[in-house]
Image (tube, rainbow, N blue to C red):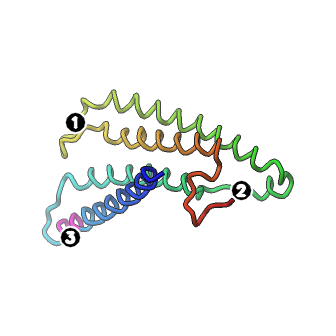
Amino acid sequence: MRLLNWLWKALDGLIAVLTIGMICLVFTNVVLRYGFSSSLRPSVELSRLGLVWVVMMGAVVAMRRDEHLAVTEFSAKLFPRAVPVLRRIGWAITLICVSMLFIGAFRQMQANWGNISQLTGLPSALFYLAGVISGGLMAFVAAVCIFIPTALLPKELDLS
């Protein structure tokens, strides 16, 4: 459990560092462009790569905290005893969907390791690597939540 807590904190830290990095890159580029008529050419691509990683890792964090958009009023009012079963069915469907994300992103990552960006020198597979990692982490969260619905929720969000 300590390793998982460290993983979730590291993920939050990664998102914060990437967000700060993107802000610095874009701000510096704006100042250089409008103040000095020049720019950092790789900053556009690096900030786009950072945005992809922030979005994908943010989806993992939101899923783990059970903060994704959900409309539960209907099932909670009409079928209160069926809610645990319905949530497990929802997690199973989620597991199938994020498994497809993982497989597709993994195939695209493998296909694009040789495509090197002219501006940054980085492989374009790094965009798809975000999907591979987030798909794997979301599959882990969904699989655990099928069997132990509140296992991965933070203590302040524990519903039991």
Q: Measured along the vertical axis of the image, is residue 69 above or below residue 120?
A: below
Q: What is the residue that sits farthest to the bottom in this orientation?
A: 35
Q: x and y percent of residue 29 in the render? A: 22, 63
In the picture, the disc for residue 91 is none
Instruction: Give the structural element (helix, strand or loop) at label 2.
Output: loop
Give, as a single range, the part of the protein colored magenta: 28-33
Question: Could you tell me which residue is drawn at 80 percent across and 52 percent down?
Answer: 75
Q: Is residue 57 left or right of residue 21?
A: right
In the picture, the disc for residue 31 is 3
Residue sitting nearer the eye, 6 or 96? 6
Q: x and y percent of residue 44 in the render? A: 26, 54
Q: CA distance from mark 2 to mark 1?
A: 43 Å
Q: x and y percent of residue 38 in the render? A: 14, 62
The residue tagged 1 is: 116
Q: How many residues crowd around disc 2 within 10 Å: few (fewer than 14), some, or many (20 or more)?
A: few
Badge 2 amino acid: Val
Whether label 2 touches label 3, CB < 8 Å: no
Mark 3 vs 1, N-terminal side: 3
Whether label 2 touches label 1, CB < 8 Å: no
Q: Main secondary structure of the magenta part?
A: helix
Q: What is the residue that sits farthest to the front in this orientation?
A: 2
Q: Measured along the vertical axis of the image, is residue 110 above or below residue 119?
A: above
Instruction: Give the structural element (helix, strand or loop) at label 3.
Output: helix
The residue tagged 2 is: 71
Mark 2 vs 1, N-terminal side: 2
Question: Could you tell me which residue is drawn at 25 percent across and 32 percent down?
Answer: 115
